[in-house]
Amino acid sequence: MVLKTLEKAGGVEVLAAAHEAVSAHHGNNYLPLLEQYYGSHCAALFTLVNAITLESTSADRSVVETVEFLRALRGAKAVFVPERLTVERVGAFFRDKLAALARSVDAGYPSNTDLVLEGGRPVLKRRKGVERRPEALGLEVALHDRLPQRALLDVLTRTAYLLGWHHHFGPAPGSDPKIKEALARATC
């Protein structure tokens, strides 16, 4: 009966393929699922990525570099993406990008007073501080007159009393505190 049911379902090959598809998803491997949903939208995604300018919000530029890598591979017809790109595939993309950046820097050079060329080498000059306005100096004096000087321990004690943050700190679990009052324990 098992063999007849297996024959009706398409045979051992179909069962093996189904098993491979299911076992490929174990261990957070979601890549086999992506192609069926996004394969037909590839052109639209590339159009979107080319229409927007991506900028990293932190020092980590891995997403921006990945998108640039994919842009360079747009015309590729291979089944697998190569680990590294050769110069001929990527050269034109980065050459154009570098040329645009160079034009932008050259256009802004005459108005940049901090950058000078000394002996053919670019040197950044130290910026001079801007003089503070008399109004700002007056405000600083008024603030110092109205706000009394306080010690750090006084500030901590007052904020602990007003906000109750000292309740979140205490001895390790299982040990009895020597000082029963939490506020006094936090300020000692």
Image: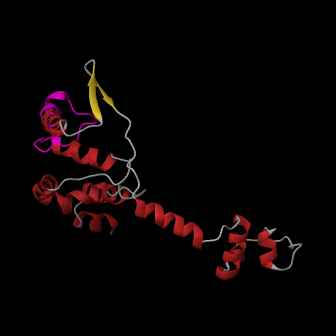
Q: Is residue 123 left or right of residue 45?
A: right
Quarter of the image where the N terminus is located: bottom left
Q: Would residue 90 be visible to someone looking at this image?
A: yes
Please identify the residue farthest to the right as the structure is shown: 178
Place of residue 91 in the rendered image (x, y in percent of width and height, measured from the top left): 15, 31
Residue in the foreground of this view, choosing between 132 and 47: 132
Residue in the foreground of this view, choosing between 74 and 108: 108
Q: Would residue 173 be visible to someone looking at this image?
A: no
**Which range of residues does the magenta coloring cover?**
72-93
Quarter of the image where the C terminus is located: bottom right
Q: Is residue 118 above or below residue 114?
A: above
Which residue corresponds to the image point at 69% horizontal and 76% vertical from the top-left?
Answer: 158
Please identify the residue farthest to the top as the structure is shown: 119
User: Is residue 148 within the magenta segment?
Assistant: no
Q: Is residue 69 above or below residue 27?
A: above
Number of numbered discs present? 0
Q: Give the image quarter of residue 96.
A: top left
Q: Is residue 120 left or right of residue 152?
A: left
Q: Give the image quarter of residue 33.
A: bottom left
Which residue corresponds to the image point at 20% horizontal and 63% vertical from the top-left?
Answer: 37
Place of residue 165 in the rendered image (x, y in percent of width and height, measured from the top left): 66, 76
